[in-house]
Amino acid sequence: MKAVILAGGRGTRISEESHLRPKPMINIGEMPILWHIMKSYHANGVSDFIICLGYRGYMIKEYFANYALHSAGAVTFDMRADEIEVSGTKAEPWRVTLIETGLDTETGGRIKRVAPWIKDDEAFCLTYGDGVGNIDIKNSILFHKTHGRKATVTTVAPAGRFGAIEMDGEKVINFSEKPKSSNTVINGGYFVLSPSVLDYIEKDSTIWERGPLETLSLEGELRAFQHNGFWQPMDTMRERDVLQKMWADGTAPWCVW
């Protein structure tokens, strides 16, 4: 099965970094968050990737063009023969297809642009290039195949923006700094989709999260795979720093490989 990763947006809310590089290329540790996302898919049996490029897409091309070179244990440059010999490479066994999907194309339009690579598959995965979690992707795929509908979205319970205090009169009986909302779940950004969803996308300006998903929901073709574990988007520098600290401390919950 293939995983389509949306990596073409401008990432304006994290402009401190994204003015230099695409948001998926912002590092967590020594590797870009895109690598972390791909590693989690690979740990769940998915190693064929289609990456939708847009803003500064050439940087993602250059990253993968040099991936084996940078991960090699030894590199020999034979100037006389005009050859490069790479050995001891630690590159992952991935197949990566990079597709230019337009600078200003919306999320739905980017999916539509990669239709030739996915239209004949039984199903495909879809995610954004800026969030990580310990999602059970393998079981979400099985769930999708079992229910037989056109689309599956992984739902997550987001942490509250502010701390919650439970009171008994003036006495504080419970304090939670970042509680999860018990009444609301949101789109966690990990989908399993049948190619028929491509028919719900009209053009480059179609926003996947609006028309297509709303219509699929109204038609009863959207099912939710519930994730109760770790999930964290990287929309701001503060969120990047949270992920960076987890990785540096060796406590990154999304590291399932």
Image (cartoon, rainbow, N blue to C red):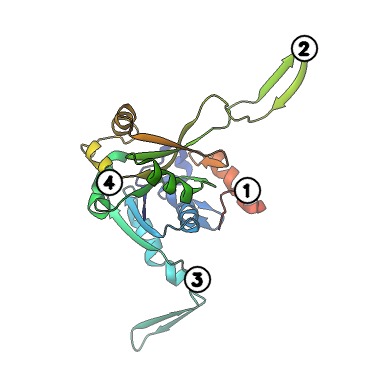
Q: State the residue position of label 3.
A: 90
Q: Dots 2 and 1: beta carbons under 8 Å?
A: no
Residue 195 — which label? 4
Q: State the residue position of label 1.
A: 246
Where residue 111 appears, as percent x and y from the top left, is 29, 45
Q: Earlier in the sequence, mark 3 or mark 4?
A: 3
Residue 41's place in the image compared with 163, above or below, is below
Tell me, yes or no, if residue 106 can be seen here: no
Given the image, on which type of amino acid does mark 3 rest? Lys
Q: State the residue position of label 2.
A: 170
**Front disc: 1 or 4:** 4
The residue lying at 35 percent from left, 53 percent from top is 51
Q: CA gap, disc 3 to disc 4?
A: 33 Å
Q: Which residue in the rendered view is the most extreme toward the right?
A: 171
Q: Is residue 168 left or right of residue 192?
A: right
Given the image, on which type of amino acid does mark 1 rest? Met
